Every structure is written in C-alpha cells, then in structure tokens.
Amino acid sequence: MQNHLIPSEISWLSFNNCILDEAEDSNNLLYERIKFLAIHSSNLDEFFRVKIRKLLTKNSKKNTELLNKILDEVNLQQNRFGAIWKKSILPESAANNIVYYENQELLEEHLEEIEYYFKSIILSYIQVIYISINQPKTYFLNNRSLYFLVKLKDTSGNFNYAYLNIPSDKLDRFKQLQSQGDTHYIISIDTIIKNCLSLIFPSGKVVSCNAIKLNRDENYLIEDENSGDLIAKIEAKIEERKRGSSTRFLYDSNMDAETLSVCKKTFRLKKDEMIKGGSHHNLYDLFKFPNPVKPNLQGANYPGLKHLPFESKKSIFEIIDKQNQLLHFPYQSYYYVLQFFNQAAINRNVLEIKITLYRISSQSLIANALISAAKNGKKVTVFVEVKARFDEYNNLFWSREMKNAGIKIIQSMPNLKVHAKVAMVTMKDKYGNKKYYNYLSTGNFNESTANIYSDFGFFTSEKKYTDDIKKVFAFLKTKKKTGAPKHILAAGFNMKERLLELIDTEIENKKAGREAAVFLKVNGVDEKDIIDKLIEASRAGVEVTLIVRGICTLLPGIKYATENIKIYRIVDMFLEHSRIYKFANNGEEKIYLSSADMLSRNLNRRIEVAYPLYDEKHIEEINTIIQLQLEDNTKRRMINSEGNNEMEILSIDEPRRAQTEIYDWLGECNVE
C-alpha cells in the first residue's frame, strides 16, 4: 500500500515551487513576477538556515537518501529560477526599454558613471582577504553575506587567491544608471565591482572572479530553560547563531575545479554543503529591483477598504459593545486595530491593557500606543515572545522600551512559545463596573505584514470570550491553569483534544447517515494525531478538504487511507496566513478562526487560541471566502497523491481568482 506521508522538507520545497509558477506566469505583470523570484530566493535561504543541519549531521541511510532528494529538487528549482530570469524576465524587461547589465558589454556612457560610484562609494566598504594556501589559518564567511572569490596570477605565473565582500548589506544591491534616450539601465553592485577589479588588484592579473555565499545553521537549542536567566541564554544563543555550522556553500557554477578545491579547504566545507549556483546570490534583493517606469509593469493597487461600522463618530468600544466585529486583512484596513489601541491609550475610563506579542514591527505603532497608555496611567501588561525565530532582537528591543515606560513585561516561558494573538482592554463603565473588550486575530500584531498577509481580526466584548481569555492571561502570569476554556480552543489547555473530538463527531455523524464534513485552512500540517484522525475520517467516508499553504506531510487520494481527502494550495499576491477550522456538525456547523496550524509545534509546544464564530453574519462571511477560494481556477493548486501541485481547471471559459474576488466582494458589501 502506498505510504500516505511525505517528508516535510520535500513538501515545503513543493510549496516553494509554486512561487516559481507565479514567477513564470506571463499573466502576472513583470514586477510581480520579479517579486515572486525574490520570495522564492528568500524562502530557499531560510530553508537552508533552519531545516537542513540535522540531515547533514545524522549520517543514516534514510537521512542520506532524503538529503540527496532535497538537493536534487533544490538544483532543479535553481535551474528553473535561472531560466525564468534569463529567458523570460530579462527579454520582457528589454522589450519595455529596461536593460539590466549582467554579462553584456557596458555602454561607453556608463563606464565613467560606474567607476565614479565604485571609487567614491563602494570602495568605502570593500575588505579584501588574501588566502594563504600552505599556511593553516582560520577564514570566516559571515552568514548570508555575499563575496567574490578571486583567482589571481602574479608576474611569476603563480596563482593566488583572495576573497572580498559585496556590500549589499550597506548599499542598495541594484543601481539605476543614466537613461539613454527612452532606454533605462540597471546594474548590480556585483557587476560594478567585477568591472573595477583592476582597481583593487593593480599588480596581479585577475584570472577569474566567482560569487560565493555561505548559509549557517540558525537553529538553537537551550538545553535547560527552567533554571537561570532564560533571556540571557537566548541572547547568548542569538550571538552563537552568527557562527553556526555551515549548511550551504553556494558557488558560481563557472568556478574551475582548482578554485573550488581551494574554497573547500579554506572554509572547511563538506561535499554535501557545496551547491552550484548562478553568478549572483541573495536574489531576495530583487524585492528592491528598480522600476524606472513605475507604476507601469506593476500589479494593481489594493488599498485597505473601510469597515463601515468603525467609520462612526462613536468610540470603537461603543461599536464593539453593540455588535461583534470581524475584519478581513489586508482587504480591509489595519487602521482599525491601531485605532483600538490608540483609543484605549487615551480613554480616561480604561484601567488596563493586556496583550501577547509574537512578531512586532520594527517601527511598531502598537508598541508606541502601549507606551502612551502606560504614561497615561493605565496598567499595561505585555507578554513578549522573545523566542520568535529571527525576531528575537526586535522583540528584546521593544521589551526594553516598554519596560522603561513602566509596562509590566512577561517574557518567554520555559519549554513553550506563546503564539496566540490576543488582547484585552479593561474599562470601567458609568456605574463603576468593569467591562472587557477583546481582540483576537489569526495574524501578528504587526502593521507591516498586515498589508500583505491574509488574516482575520475579531473584536468582542461578550462575556463568554472574556472569561476564556482571562484564563489564558492568568496562565501567562502565574504559570498555573485555572480550568479549560469553555468556548475558545487554547493549545496548552484543550485545543488538540477538542479538535480530535470535533473530527470524531464528524465520523460518528457520517456513520449515522448525518451531514458530515471537515474543512481546515492552515499554513502547515504534520501533527501525527491530527493526521491519523483525518485518515480515520476519510476511511469513514467523511469529506475532508484542506487548504494548506506550506508544509503538508499528508498525501491525499490514496485508496483505503486518504481517498476522501482533498488538499489545495493558494499562492497569489497576498500571503495566505489565516487559519479556519470548519465542521459540518450535522447542519449546525462550527467555525473557528485560529492562530494555530496543524503542526506538532503549534498543538504540543505552544500557547495558541482559536475562537468560535456565533454570529450568523460572520459565519456567512467566512463561508463566502471559503467558497471563493475553492472556486479559484487560476491561483489554486491541487496537491496530488505524490505531493506535487496540479492546476485544477474548473472552468476554462471563466477565470476565477479568489483574492481579487474577495476584495471586490468586500468592497461591494462594505461589511456592516
């Protein structure tokens, strides 16, 4: 019988291949396609920073086979990336009078311009390190930084080697040169440096110059989180991460064998870590690829829509008191979330604000509102998850800023991450009684990502939500549980158990001939007990539909196991980040919006919150969104039983695109 599981690494690479589909799709405008190339490069870079090291260090046959499969797939995707860039992006750019200098000869008019820029600006940041081949010495490449490995020939005919940095961390990677007539020219600082090597090495002949880059393992393990200063341990591990073991050494495929051997010896590399690449690395810098004809060649602008109830002159708290409010980001403006905290900060009746922060914007308006609230005499308690990978420094910075303003800061808990996105504002009413206003979300309190991440935000003052959220905040403060929540699902309390029970109910309903179905929209699926229960549901005949953006280790369509399971992916202009759990429940459907994926880490090692929807209007809105996504025939892929992506054309005559249709639908109804 065919195995119904796929390695998470292979599944993730399958998702990243969808990004290349979008980069290759000529229906997308040129700069949208360039953006997808940048996303693919950024994703792959992170993959080698966090997902590979264990396979490189554990030399079992199974791991070796998986590593080889991964590297083969990475090679295919890198070749595909290069082909899209050279055969599609560059010709289309040229057709629009945008010339990108790569290997072609520079115009005479630009030679002086780039030499001036090199001498006056770039050269300020260049550091050259000569390699002594015969004398043992430690050479170090910074994680994710760009370098050139230069092969030199001296007057005696001897070969020497040096490497120098490409200062893309200090300067814009791409520079727009003077236009010539109607034609615009763009050049990378890599190419500028290559053309000015004689100024760096005046006494030697440059034989070759090849781009190199090193990824280092950025995972860290704190062996004992229960004793000592956890924050100090995290800070120490963050510093260690800069010197982590190598996981990928990318080198220009044009590099000769002798130079490659020098690299291997100089940087103490292993064969499996050395991967052929192109002549340019870190192409996530394409996010800032100049557009001289802006706004042409870019996708349509989708400004955040208004949410009419919040456009009233009444305070946001009066509006929430009248009716629960559901927002859809980025289709609707994130301004209302900021308004919630800004009004709380200055309202004389507000007594206290509590909030969990996982990933904070570097220029966080929410953090500043909390600081203002504290300075205005409000009691403010903030749980900051310092262990949020790659955001540790940012979160530590804001922790200090808020603490200095008088905010009570609770930082990372041992052996748990707090990934829930909840806030509670306590206010006194005109009778002096306490009233509570809650905000729950599927996405982070981050106004920057809210512009590109698809998420839901929910405002409520109903007691049934308040009572449950109080239990979550009480646990964060005391580390003691005061009973399981009754309405919300909370990982760390009852989420996984309740999910299994909800699926069990669908199984029982199906066996009894009642209406039964399970729908899950999440970013990842790998939790064993959930997968086993979904397979049990499939075997019982329950229709199971998943929309999974990233990793999905479960394979659909396998006889006697997952034949009643369908799995889809949607990759489009907005990153699908929201989580929806929906259960048919014999016609009385239950819908939850959540911060949690169906991943082991979310359900077993994190504090998460899923909140139920009871308002018929909100249930109808979510069902409309689900239906639009399932009818998408341009950006929705179906995952097959091999784990590959297939476009499922539902109607050739009528192209359907969920994200634009959701935007238009919300604009038309302007949810009241």
Image (cartoon, helix red, strand yellow):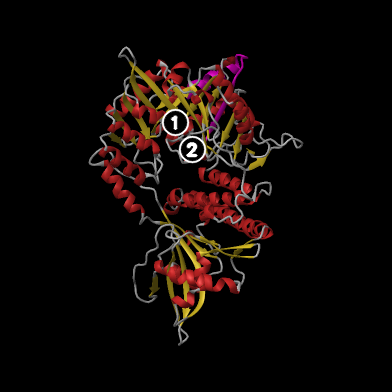
Up-down relation of residue 526 to residue 66 (above or below)? above
Q: Residue furthest left?
A: 228
Q: Determine if residue 260 is in view.
A: no
- Please indicate whether residue 637 sits to the left or right of residue 64 in the image: right
Q: Determine if residue 75 is in view.
A: yes
Q: Amino acid at mark 1?
A: Val
Q: CA distance from mark 2 to mark 1?
A: 10 Å
- Please indicate whether residue 553 sits to the left or right of residue 161 in the image: right
Q: Residue at x 53, y 73 (%)?
A: 112
Which of the pair 316/415 is nearer the observer? 316
Task: Measuring from the top left, give residue 391's x and y in whole percent.
Answer: 39, 44
Residue for badge 2:
450
Inspect the magenta stretch and tell me whether residue 502 lies in it. Answer: yes
Which of the pair 467/537 is nearer the observer? 467
Q: Is label 2 in a helix, a strand or a loop?
A: helix
Residue for badge 1:
337
Q: Residue furthest bottom?
A: 156
Task: Measuring from the top left, give residue 265's x and y in whole percent.
Answer: 42, 69
Residue 274 image label: none
Question: Tag 1 or tag 2, which sits nearer the N-term?
Answer: 1
Q: Amino acid at mark 2?
A: Ala
Q: Residue furthest top?
A: 431
Q: Which residues are magenta?
A: 499-522
